[in-house]
Image (cartoon, rainbow, N blue to C red):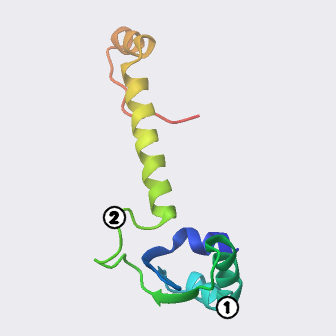
């Protein structure tokens, strides 16, 4: 559950002894606050030093956030780009072009399987 919260978090700062993140309001923010000690322990093990977690609640990535936003946003963008590429390749496939020519039609919708 903590992993899902952190996937939605946007890194604001990674400083000496502090990691600042912004989490979406609602359940992610509640879980992050409830599990703050657990998250700090994981960060301490990973970074090899004591770390304080600073939580900010907000829906949109603030201007000072690094480009790219949260991991969840990056994964969604990758899925959308991959889907667009697959659909374009399908439209350009020789067999599909031939079927379109025979049927005197153009593909209007491509569903991924």
Sequence-wise first label, 1 or 2: 1
Q: Which mark is residue 34?
A: 1
Above or below residue 40? Residue 81 is above
Residue named by callout 2? 67
| Residue 98 at x, y percent in the picture | 39, 9
| 1 in relation to 93, above or below | below
Residue sitting at x 61%, y 91%? 33
Residue at position x 45%, y 62% from top?
Answer: 73
Q: Secondary structure at mark 1?
A: helix
Separation (CA) of disc 1 from disc 2: 28 Å
- Please give the name of the residue rendered at 65% of the width and 70% of the height, measured from the top-left corner: 46
The answer to which quarter of the image holds residue 85 is: top left
Q: Is residue 17 left or right of residue 108?
A: right
Mark 1 surroundings within 10 Å by alpha-carbon count, few (fewer than 14), some (14 through 19), many (20 or more):
few
Question: What percent of the width, then of the height, locates residue 35?
Answer: 68, 86
What x and y, as percent, mark residue 34?
A: 67, 91
Location of the C terminus by quadrant is top right
């Amino acid at each position: 559950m903590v992993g899902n919260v952190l996937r939605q978090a946007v890194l604001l700062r990674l400083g000496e002894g502090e990691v600042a993140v912004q989490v979406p309001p609602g359940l992610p923010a509640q879980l992050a606050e409830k599990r703050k000690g657990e998250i700090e322990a994981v960060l301490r093990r990973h970074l090899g030093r004591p770390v304080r977690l600073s939580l900010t609640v907000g829906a949109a990535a603030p201007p000072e956030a690094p480009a790219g936003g949260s991991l969840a946003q990056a994964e969604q963008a990758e899925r959308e780009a991959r889907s667009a590429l697959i659909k374009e390749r399908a439209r350009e496939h020789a067999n599909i072009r031939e079927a379109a020519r025979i049927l005197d039609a153009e593909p209007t919708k491509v569903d991924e399987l």
